[in-house]
Each structure stands twice: as structure tokens, then as C-alpha cells.
Amino acid sequence: MERIRSSKFNKPVFTCGEGVRFATPEVVASYRAGRLKTGVLADISCGIGGQTVCFAEECDRVYGVDIDGERLECARRNAGVYGVDNITFIEGDALSSQVVEQVADANIIFSDPARPAEENVRQTASLRPGIPMVMEAYRDVTNSFAFEAPPQMPPERIDFDCEREYLGVDGQLNRLTLYFGPLKGCERSAVVLKGDMYYRLKSGVYTSIGITEADEISDYAFEPDPAVVKAELLGELAAELNIKMGIVRIDARRSLLTSVSNINSPFFKNIYRVLDKVTFDCNNINRSLKEHSIGKALIRFNVSPDRYWDVRNRIESGLVGKTTVHLYQISGMIYIMEMLKSEPSNHFGTG
């Protein structure tokens, strides 16, 4: 056991093994604890206690269960670090009748189960303890369950009657939480955390607008937060914004939304304004960059590693400006785009 500083936490925490690696970041744990605020909550796979401590800050009482005594001791010490004293720690198998009996007054059961370190296709069947096993073990305790699952899984791969909540932090997909029973608020949701604010987009609130496939970018382009993409809520986002948008497929993994108008939304990771569109020729690109007083150009299209710096150096040859642009390739054309700053917004959000 050791005490370390980690970017995941605001204070130095106690850890052992790979405890910090698998721990929930404090910003995520705080959000999730707010959503699951209740009288008594049982965290039946508490690890070193990152999520458990945040539950304790919101709930009246919390049970922290783990089968590993050393991890549990880390969690106990971390409760002291954060100054919470309303956690009862239990060492044991969360599926055993002895543990179930000890947490029989819980209103909510939360589980962050173990999963294989390497897996070709992430699936709920690989979680341990499995979701059906947990729900069966605690069926006489409550019907309110929340599980963490691998965020790489698309909604259609989760064959349960639950809400699938994808959560993004700093433009990166971070967590997937499955909410069962009374905790289910919709079929799919996306939550974006920005500072001390969170923004939630839900399915079923707005009628999804079909977004037209486009083969070119209009005046503005928007890179949606991966949580919105993974939750398959682009149509709902367009409906909420009440604006006609197109979608441009960059490659199999990346897409941009586009519109003739600039739009500010917390569900956009990046916002771009198109400065120019030229054919894919390094001299043409370089000429345009000089005309717009650009100093640096970031290549956002696929270039083989052995050619990357040759292309980059030719594109940036003789540039003296201070502005940085992003270069996207679509339908054989290079779009030169300036990233715009998004304005803080309370739209969609609660925080």
C-alpha cells in the first residue's frame, strides 16, 4: 500500500496494485453520486473507494464491499482522507448470502465489476460478477441497480432493459453506466462534464431529426462529443438545436457535423470555421495558408508515417503567422479550418 498523487483525484490517495488505474475519476464519481443520491447505497465492488467516498458525500449511509482486504483497507483510509465517516466497509464476496444480509436495507446497489484487461469485442457477458448474477442475488433487497460497463460497447450490444448513459470528460469517452428499475430515465443518454457543470442529452425527449449525409463541409463544422456519438444521439441533438445540419464522414471512426451557421453547444468537442477549400496539393495548401497568415497546420487526414513530416514540412514551408489551423480531407479536397472557442453555456445542463 502507498499514498500517491493522481490526476484522477483532488487529494493524494491510498492505493495498492492497480487500484488507481481502475479507480473512477473524482469528477465522474461526484456526478454519478449526485444522480444516485439516496438514503442507503451499497457499492458492492468498491476497490480503493474513489466512487464510494463520493457516494458517502451524497447519501445518508453507504456500504463499501470488496473481496480484497488490502483494497478495502485503502478505501477505508481514503474515506479518512476525504473526511467521510458514514461508510460501513465489508470484506467478502458480494454475491454471498452473508454480504447480502448485511446490506439488506440498501435502496440502491451499485457495481463496477471486473472485466478482462484484453478483449477483442467488449461485452457485458465478460463482467464479473455478471449483471444477472448481481440482480438475482439482491432481488429481495431492491430493484434499483446501477452498473459500470465498458464504454466502447454500442447501445445495441447491451441486451438489458436499462438506460445506457455514455459519459464524456474533456472530449474523451470516459464511462458507461447502466441504470435499471426506477433509476432508468430513458433508453440512451449522453452526459458531458465540463468543470463543475454537467450536460445531459436524452433519447425520447425530442423527435430525432434525420441528419443529411453530405459530401462537403459548409461554412462551419462541428466535432460532436464522443459520448453523443456513442449514444447515437446526433439526431436528437439536431432536433434540440432546431437547426438543419449535415454529417460528413471523415473515415470509419470520425464524422463532422456541418451547417451554414455557427452553433454553440456543450455537446460539441470542437467547433471550426472554414477558411478555404483547395485541392490536395502541398503547394496549393501552402499558398492558401500564407494568404490567411497561418503559422501552423495540423494534419487531420491520414498520411502514412513515413511521409508525414515530408508533407507537413512542405505544407508549413515559410509560414510566419501565429494562427493554427486544422486540415481535413473530404472528397479529395482539403478544408482549411480555424478552431473557434466555444462559449460557456447553461443550455441542456444542470450543475
Image: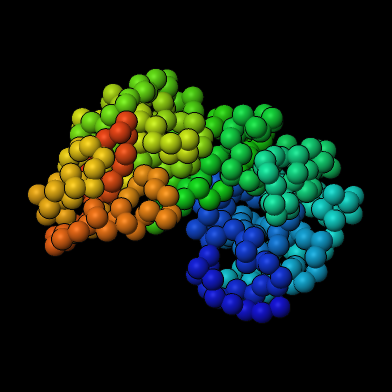
Q: Is residue 216 above or below residue 119?
A: above
In the rendered image, residue 187, in percent from the top left (x then y), is placed at 57, 29
Q: Nearer the viewer, residue 320 or 15?
A: 320
| Tag count | 0
Residue at left 54%, top 71%?
A: 6
Residue at left 20%, top 59%?
A: 317
Residue 55: tell me if it is visible: yes
Apparent side of residue 323 relative to residue 266 in the rendered image (left or right) = left
Q: How is the image coloured?
A: rainbow
Q: Quadrant of the N terminus?
A: bottom right
Residue at left 51%, top 35%?
A: 231
Single out the residue that lies furthest toward the right.
97
Q: Nearer the viewer, residue 120 or 207?
A: 120
Location of residue 16 by image quarter: bottom right
In the rendered image, residue 10, in percent from the top left (x then y), is placed at 50, 70
Apparent side of residue 67 relative to residue 344 in the rendered image (left or right) = right
Q: Is residue 3 above or below residue 213?
A: below
Location of residue 348 by image quarter: top left
In the rendered image, residue 175, in percent from the top left (x then y), is placed at 56, 48
Residue at left 76%, top 64%?
A: 89
Single out the residue that lies furthest toward the left.
291
Q: Is residue 89 above or below residue 285?
A: below
Apparent side of residue 250 relative to residue 182 in the rendered image (left or right) = left
Residue 199: tell me if it is visible: no
Q: Is residue 244 above or below residue 84?
A: above
In the rendered image, residue 306, in percent from the top left (x then y), is placed at 42, 55
Apparent side of residue 334 relative to residue 239 in the rendered image (left or right) = left
